[in-house]
Image (cartoon, rainbow, N blue to C red):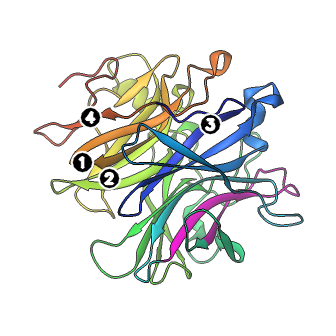
Amino acid sequence: MVIALEDKWIWDSWYAHDGEKWHGYFLQADKSLGDPDARHFNVTQGHAVSDDLKTWTHLGTTFAPADGPAWDDKTTWTGSVVQDDGGQWHLFYTGTSAAENAMYQRIGHATSDDMHNWTRVGDGLCLDITGENAKYYEADHMVGFWHDRAMRDPWVMRDPEGEGWLMYFTARAPNIAEANAGGAIGFATSPDLVNWRLEPPVFVGGFGQLEVPQVFERNGTWYCLFCNDAIHWSNEYLDSYSDKPVTGTHYLIGSSPRGPWHIAPGAFLDGDMPCRRYAARIVEHEGQLQILGFEDRGRDQFVGQIMDPEPVVVNPDGTLYIPTSKGQAT
């Protein structure tokens, strides 16, 4: 069964395994709002558990915006969950404030011993576009040029090439004339999950934004998933693409988690018009890669539930393939 709630829309999701069960976290908003677009600014985070990624038990709301005034008193959006060496769980999330009309995004941090009840570390704020490497980012809201100051969707993972931790996030690069060519995968490093250093982006270009990044390795090849709307394709990528633009999930490919990264060749991994599935994640369950994302169908037919997982195949050349995805070819 899909991850669904009768009275709430569900969209972006992320997953963690505790050794026995899958924990699914997701953005949720009350359907009583009437307009699905209103969900973005009336959001909390939900939590469900599963043995098989198909049958889910809902545990209710797990995280919400702070009481104001605070840097994250308006929204707490998409993130990721990891476990440290001591067994404590860490939630990294996107926060915005009412004072800034949710236009400036920053990254927050909370911890938990049970994966459901979360406590902010200090005031929660762990990373902003500040310091010596801020020059590599669009650090201010470029009103009239782009719709927000992007710094969201943190994906945190252990550094496989050394000690410490890596963070990837949705961002934008500065001083690029074409708005749809300024999307970036932001990057930060930490020795301890608490103290973070902003680094230059690991990828810039191709799209106006690369949302909900997820980095993983398979057979020595590194992948960085991202999702994107067809209206945010750059002119260069449009010219290079042999088919019509689609909305959905694609990926970067590289030889190291630090890059260099390039846009995977061929068909968009999981796209359609109107969008079928968005903000997808790939997890490994019982030795098989599986993709999960929310059912979209576009603004006029928004569904708001997480679709059942579907298998992902790694082709001999290292590219990814979803047999059930429209337009895919091996």
The amino acid marked with disc number 1 is Glu
* Mark 2 residue element: strand
Question: Who comes first in sequence, dot 1 or dot 4?
Answer: 4
Picture quarter containing residue 107? bottom right
Q: CA distance from mark 4 to mark 3?
A: 31 Å
**In the depicted view, which residue is nearer to us: 153 or 43?**
43
Q: CA distance from mark 1 to mark 4?
A: 28 Å
Range covered by the magenta-colored residues: 88-110
**In the depicted view, which residue is nearer to us: 267 or 96?**
96
* Mark 1 residue element: loop
- Residue at the disc numbered 3: 10
129 up-or-down from 140: above or below? below
Question: Who comes first in sequence, dot 2 or dot 1?
Answer: 2
Magenta region includes residue 113: no
192 up-or-down from 287: above or below? below
- Would residue 31 be seen by someone viewing this image from the given angle? yes
The amino acid marked with disc number 2 is Trp
Label 4 vs label 3, nearer the camera: 3
- Residue at the disc numbered 4: 265
Residues packed near mark 3 inside 10 Å, few (<14), some (14 to 19) or many (20 plus): many
The amino acid marked with disc number 3 is Ile
Q: Are marks 2 and 3 in contact (CB under 8 Å)?
A: no
Label 2 vs label 1, nearer the camera: 1
Q: CA distance from mark 2 to mark 3?
A: 31 Å
- Residue at the disc numbered 2: 261
Q: Which numbered circle lies on residue 286?
A: 1
Q: CA distance from mark 1 to mark 3?
A: 26 Å
Label 2 vs label 3, nearer the camera: 3
